[in-house]
Image (cartoon, rainbow, N blue to C red):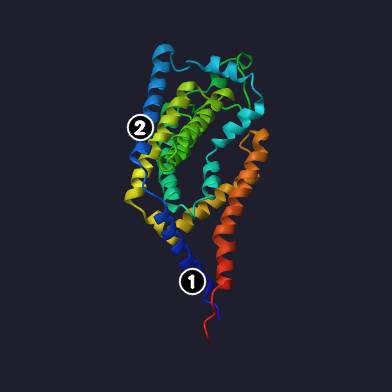
């Protein structure tokens, strides 16, 4: 008879997490240094804008420049800053690289605290609440309050900065950094954030990634324990499922979000159920 399925799946996951942890090297020092430099540059940009021309500095120029591009570009980019997207993308590698997944979770918690504490404290008005409707380009929902800092920018900063820590290629780091910056700038392009919000949000997200990577390296139960890992994966699955029916107000990106949701759910079903159950079926049967 075959071994008990539940016991087999638990042992299979335990072995996979151990192999994944061994497969993932510690973040190199130059990866951590990249994050420090990135965060410092964001701080310099935010301070320069604010001190030179005030909180609203640069918005009309950037928003007007972005209006020349096709709206779908900004729909897609700003949708990638949705906090559900990192959950979907992380399901593509959570089992194979559990340390990276765990670092993303810890960094995400730090980043969420940064934005959710900052927004109500400052309660800054967004561009639609300050500017005349015809004076700028608005794409998507008309949001009025809680402008500082940009949550989408912080989300992009967290996700891509954690990946920057673990990849080794300078080109890959530059590409990930550029993508995070473009996602942040898309919030100005769609007309719901000031450039200072974006620079500060990116800074907070990158710092959260730096803190998260360091904390995750010290406390690894979320990477090595099957029970906590499965709990976090279940949360990621629930967040990913919502991408298949909610576009966050950016309808031109609904197909992209639905595709990411299907890919994430398919990866989770394959790596955590279909393939392990296949291995269980092929397992040698114990003699009665």
Quarter of the image that includes the N terminus: bottom right
In the depicted view, which residue is nearer to us: 255 or 53? 255
Name the quadrant containing residue 170. top left
Q: Which mark is residue 36?
A: 2
In the depicted view, which residue is nearer to us: 196 or 264? 264
Alpha-carbon neighbours of circle 1 within 10 Å: few (<14), some, or many (≥20)?
few
The residue positioned 36% from the left and 47% from the top of the image is: 26
Q: Position of residue 169 (x, y in %)?
A: 44, 38
How far apart, in angstroms, are the residues tagged by discs 2 and 1? 44 Å
Q: Horizontal placement of 156 versus 133: left or right?
A: left
Q: Horizontal placement of 186 versus 35: left or right?
A: right
Q: Position of residue 74 (x, y in %)?
A: 61, 28
Q: Which mark is residue 146?
A: none
The residue positioned 58% from the left and 49% from the top of the image is: 264
The residue positioned 45% from the left and 56% from the top of the image is: 229
> Is any atom of residue 146 visible in this view?
yes
Residue at the bottom extreme of this rendering: 288
Residue at the left extreme of this rendering: 218
Relative to residue 151, is residue 134 depicted above or below?
above
Name the quadrant containing residue 116. top left
Q: Position of residue 194 (x, y in %)?
A: 50, 22
The residue positioned 38% from the left and 19% from the top of the image is: 47
> Is any atom of residue 191 visible in this view?
no
At numbered mark 2, what does the secondary structure look like: helix, strand or loop? Answer: helix
At numbered mark 1, what does the secondary structure look like: helix, strand or loop? Answer: helix
Relative to residue 48, is residue 165 depicted above or below?
below
Pick whichever of labels 2 and 1 is earlier in the sequence.
1
Relative to residue 148, is residue 230 depicted above or below?
below
Residue on which disc 1 sits? 7
Label total for image:
2
């Amino acid at each position: 008879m075959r071994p008990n399925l539940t016991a087999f799946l638990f042992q299979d996951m335990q072995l996979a997490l151990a192999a994944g942890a061994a497969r993932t090297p510690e973040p190199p020092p130059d990866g951590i240094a990249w994050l420090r430099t990135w965060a410092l540059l964001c701080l310099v940009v935010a301070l320069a804008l604010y001190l030179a021309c005030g909180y609203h500095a640069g918005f009309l120029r950037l928003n007007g420049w972005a209006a020349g591009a096709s709206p779908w570009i900004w729909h897609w980019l700003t949708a990638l800053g949705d906090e559900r997207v990192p959950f979907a993308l992380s399901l593509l590698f959570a089992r194979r690289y559990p340390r990276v997944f765990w670092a993303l979770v810890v960094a995400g918690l730090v980043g969420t605290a940064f934005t959710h504490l900052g927004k109500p404290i400052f309660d800054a008005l967004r561009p639609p609440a300050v500017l005349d409707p015809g004076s700028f380009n608005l794409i998507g929902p008309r949001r009025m309050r809680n402008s500082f800092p940009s949550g989408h920018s912080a989300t992009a900063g967290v996700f891509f900065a954690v990946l920057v820590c673990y990849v080794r290629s300078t080109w890959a780091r530059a590409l990930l950094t550029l993508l995070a910056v473009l996602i942040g700038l898309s919030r100005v392009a769609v007309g719901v954030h000031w450039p200072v919000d974006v620079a500060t949000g990116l800074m907070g997200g990158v710092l959260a990634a730096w803190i998260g990577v360091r904390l995750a390296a010290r406390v690894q139960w979320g990477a090595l324990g099957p029970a906590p890992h499965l709990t976090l994966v279940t949360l990621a699955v629930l967040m990913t499922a919502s991408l298949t029916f909610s576009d966050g107000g950016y309808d031109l990106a609904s197909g992209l979000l639905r595709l990411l949701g299907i890919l994430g759910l398919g990866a989770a079903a394959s790596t955590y159920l279909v393939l392990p159950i296949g291995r269980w079926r092929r397992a040698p049967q114990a003699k009665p």
